[in-house]
Amino acid sequence: MINVKVLGSGCANCRNLEERVRAVVQKRQLAAEIEKVTDYAQIMRWNVLRTPGLVINNVLVSAGRIPSEAEIAGWLK
């Protein structure tokens, strides 16, 4: 199972990233656990200074932007 963490305070960009991740997971019928991390202390553990951040299987793959669905799909392989 793929572990995905969306890091952010819950702002519009953070929600948009979560929606994109969920859309990719659903379209590709992937087994994934998606977790929203809103606690600032936990976000800082990943050294994310600008949200949203995206962590896949404990690897930070994106921060400070909303990646495309194609990028997300590539990371979820």
Image (spheres, rainbow, N blue to C red):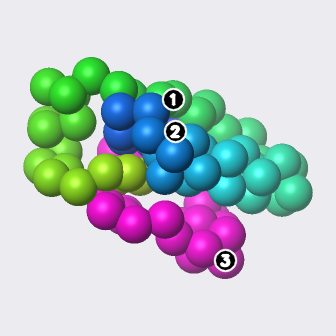
The residue located at (40%, 66%) in the rendering is 65
Asked whether the residues under the numbered discs 1 and 2 touch, taking CB atoms below 8 Å apart as contact, a structural biologist would say yes
Residue type, mark 2 in image: Asn
**Which of 1/73 is in front?**
73
How far across and down, in percent of the image, does residue 43 sit? 22, 36
Relative to 69, 8 lies left or right:
left
Does 25 sit above or below residue 44? below
Relative to 48, 14 lies left or right:
right
Quadrant position of residue 68: bottom right
Q: Which comes sooner in the sequence, label 1 or label 3?
A: 1
- Give the mark count: 3
2 vs 3, front mark: 3
How far across and down, in percent of the image, does residue 55 sit? 39, 49
Quadrant position of residue 72: bottom right
Query: For residue 67: magenta?
Result: yes
Residue type, mark 3 in image: Ala
Q: Secondary structure at mark 2?
A: strand
Image mark for residue 35:
1
Residue type, mark 1 in image: Glu
Image mark for residue 3:
2
Q: Which residue is mark 3?
A: 70
Q: Which comes sooner in the sequence, label 2 or label 3?
A: 2
Q: How far apart are the two marked residues, 2 and 3, measured between alpha carbons?
A: 18 Å
Q: Is residue 56 visible?
A: no
Q: Which residues are magenta?
A: 55-77
Does 40 sit above or below residue 12? above
